[in-house]
Image (cartoon, grey):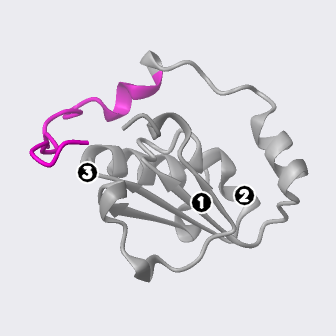
Amino acid sequence: MTEDWVWDETLFAGAAPYYDRGRLPYAPTLVTVLADVLGLDGTGRLLDVGCGPGTLSVPLAPLFGEVVGVDPDPGMLDEAARRAAAVGGAAKSRWVRIRAEDLPADLGTFTVAVFAQSFHW
C-alpha cells in the first residue's frame, strides 16, 4: 500500500443491507468443515477481519464463546450487529470499527482469525 493512500469513508455507504447480494455465497458446508477441522466446540474466540455485514462471523458464532468482527465501515458493523441479534448471537458478539492495519493489541488473543473476502483490501 502506498503511504499516501487514504481510506474513503463513503466507499460502502448504504451498501450493508444489500452487500451479500453481490457476493458469491460460501460453500454450504463451510461451517461444518471448519468446526470439524479446527475442533471448534463453542468456546474460544473468533476474530473476523473485514467482517462486513457479518456474512461469515454470524454463521460461525455458535462455534465460539466470543466473536469480534472488525470493519472500517459503520454501516457494515450495524448490519452485522442486527444479523447477530436476529439469530440470538448478540450477547457473544462485539463489533469494532477499525481498519485491519490499525488493530490494537488490547483485542486479546483468538482461537481463529478469518479474513474471508476482505483479504484483498
Q: Earlier in the sequence, mark 1 or mark 3?
A: 3
Instruction: Look at the image and say whether residue 11 sits in the magenta stretch.
Output: yes
The residue under label 2 is 62
User: How many numbered circles does the render carry?
Assistant: 3
Front residue of this view, candidates 85 and 29: 29
Task: Give the quadrant of the N terminus.
Answer: top left
Tell me where the magenta segment starts and ends, as one range: 1-20
Query: In the image, residue 59 lies at what x, y percent?
Result: 65, 45
Q: Earlier in the sequence, mark 2 or mark 3?
A: 2
Type of amino acid at the residue the image marks with label 1: Gly
Could you give the CA–CA distance between mark 2 and mark 1, rounded to whole angstroms?
8 Å
Query: In the image, residue 116 lies at what x, y percent?
Result: 56, 39
Q: Quadrant location of residue 19?
A: top left
SS assignment at label 3: helix
Residue at the image position 72 percent from the left and 57 percent from the top: 62
Q: Are marks 2 and 3 in contact (CB under 8 Å)?
A: no
Instruction: Give the foreground label among 1 and 3.
Output: 3
Residue at the image position 50 percent from the left and 34 percent from the top: 117
Type of amino acid at the residue the image marks with label 3: Pro
Q: Quadrant location of residue 101?
A: bottom left
Does residue 42 lie above or below 88 as drawn?
Answer: below
Front residue of this view, candidates 49 and 79: 49
Instruction: Look at the image and say whether residue 23 sits in the magenta stretch.
Output: no
Front residue of this view, candidates 45 and 58: 45
Query: In the image, residue 106 lies at what x, y percent?
Result: 42, 82
Q: Are marks 2 and 1 in contact (CB under 8 Å)?
A: yes
Does residue 19 lie above or below 7 as drawn?
Answer: above
The residue under label 3 is 74
**Relative side of 88 to 31, left or right:** left
Q: Which circle marks residue 89 in the picture?
A: 1
Could you give the CA–CA distance between mark 2 and mark 3, rounded to whole angstroms?
24 Å
